[in-house]
Amino acid sequence: MSKRIAVLVRERQAEALRMALGLVLLDDAVDVYVLDRRLADQADIRLHLTTLKEFDFRLYTNDPANAEMECLSAAEIAQRLPEYDHALVY
């Protein structure tokens, strides 16, 4: 049975994106939420983000500076979280 997993990204951005990529092997539905800040402009983060997009991960943020992601308010994100089986916070 497939699970729904939310990966919440804050301080440990590269680690969170790497973990989200690893979850693709489980055949679960994984959504990534970048919260309260812009993603750092680092090579490993850019690579992870590109790979996530290639695997059609859904990427959300509450910071409009992350233009490559769908922007939601903090309230909208909070309403979505109970729908997930697991939430991984980084």
Image: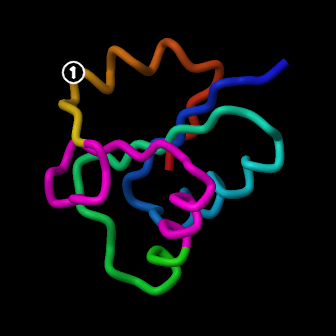
Q: Relative to residue 31, is residue 76 drawn left or right?
A: left
Front-lying residue, 58 or 15: 58
Task: Please give the name of the residue rendered at 47% of the width and 74% of the height, measured from the top-left corner.
Answer: 45
Residue bearing the label numbered 1:
75
Q: Secondary structure at mark 1?
A: helix
Position in image of residue 7 (x %, y %): 53, 42
Specify the quadrant of the image occupied by residue 41: bottom left
Q: Relative to residue 72, is residue 11 drawn left or right?
A: right
Position in image of residue 85 (x %, y %): 64, 19
Decide whether residue 63 is among the magenta residues. Answer: yes
Tell me which segment is drawn in magenta.
Answer: 48-70
Front-lying residue, 69 or 63: 69
Position in image of residue 46 (x %, y %): 45, 77
Task: Please give the name of the residue rendered at 46% of the width and 86% of the height, measured from the top-left corner.
Answer: 43
Decide whether residue 60 is among the magenta residues. Answer: yes
> In which quadrant will I find the N terminus?
top right
Specify the quadrant of the image occupied by residue 30: top right
Q: Residue furthest bottom?
A: 43
Task: Please give the name of the residue rendered at 37% of the width and 53% of the height, measured from the top-left corner.
Answer: 10
Position in image of residue 3 (x %, y %): 72, 23
Q: How is the image coloured?
A: rainbow
Amino acid type, label 1: Ala
Task: Please give the name of the residue rendered at 48% of the width and 66% of the height, measured from the top-left corner.
Answer: 49
Q: Relative to residue 16, is residue 79 drawn left or right?
A: left
Labels in figure, total: 1
Front-lying residue, 59 or 81: 59
Mark 1 neighbour density, 10 Å: few (under 14) some (14–19) many (20 or more): few
